[in-house]
Amino acid sequence: MHAAPNEKDALLISSFETRWDHALQSLDATLRDSGRVIDVRPGDEVGFQQQKVAGAYLVSFGQLQMSIHERGISRAIRVCGAGQLVGYGTWFVPEKKYYSLLALEKARVRFYTETKLKDLRLHSFEISELIIEALCRIIDIKDDLICTLEQVSAVDRVKSLLDSLLDNFGVVDKEGQLIGSRVSRRSLAQMSGVTAESFSRILTDLEDQGVIKRRRRNIVVVDRSHLRPLEKSLSDKPTDAGL
């Protein structure tokens, strides 16, 4: 089971853009300035197709909700924050589906075309390593999600999501830890793999148990220890010795 990011992991994520910029300094000016800076306001959508050319975004600051659109259905899949490389490899995705980013607050991203990213990889070993690191983190998130959806109850999936949001966007609060993310409850439900009604009911139960408190659209986690039953529940399951 994927463990919650520790302090070292959080430091690596937060310093990703710093390490990226440091790697760029060894390149010529054309490559150093190859990313286009885009400032977005809350509610603005940044689509990969809108750029008219394949590429990926490096988030400088702010939160953006990543969604997948397929056959007329849109589904939120995760919240992206500072220092994350988003959308690398989307040019390999079949045309029948596409991804988009919705700004949840004031944010800044840098857009790199597929061609520029290829040039950066060819000219900088450090950039190549950073791209691999970013992809490995995304694979880790997806593996965790698959494992969670297959083996864990709806309640524990919601708890796992809240715990993950605390790792990435938690803010110290007088009553505990505030989840400093502006993502909608409907999107949080989609990320948990439950219906909006089930998500609301689970939050009510957690509030009745004293685990969380709701302040309008915000969630404050009062007792985080109750959000981490996953590792134990999965470790109790029998495993195939041949795997």
Image (tube, grey):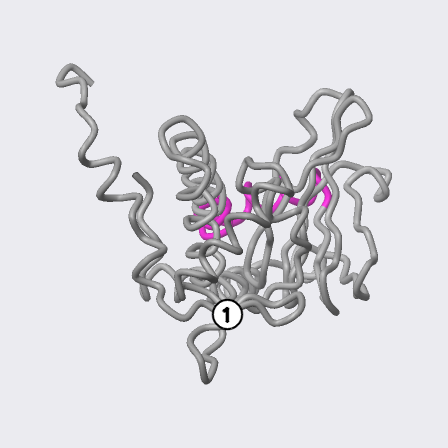
**Within the magenta stretch, is there residue 230?**
no
| Coordinates of residue 70 in the picture (x, y in percent) | 75, 25
Q: Give the camera-side residue of 203 and 53.
A: 203
Q: Quadrant of residue 233?
A: top left
Say how many tags the image has: 1
Is 56 or 226 nearer to us in this picture? 226
Query: Please, which residue is most extreme toward the top here?
Result: 242
Task: Specify few, some or many for label 1: CA neighbours under 10 Å numbering under 14, 14-19, or 20 or more.
Answer: many
The quadrant holding residue 182 is: bottom right
Provide residue 131's location: percent of width, then percent of height: 51, 45
117 part of magenta stretch = yes
Q: Which region is colored magenta? A: 113-131
Task: Please state the horizontal and vertical placement of residue 205, each as a whole percent of the image.
Answer: 47, 54
Which residue is the site of mark 1? 220
The residue located at (40%, 35%) in the rendering is: 153
Q: Is residue 236 left or right of residue 33?
A: left
Q: Residue at x 60, y 44 (%)?
A: 189
Amino acid carrying label 1: it is Val
Q: Main secondary structure of the magenta part?
A: helix
- The image shows residue 39, relative to residue 198, as above or below, that is below
- At a point 36% along the width and 29% down the height, the residue shown is 151
Q: Secondary structure at mark 1?
A: strand
Residue 128 drawn above or below residue 25? above
Left or right placement of residue 66 versus residue 233 in this view: right
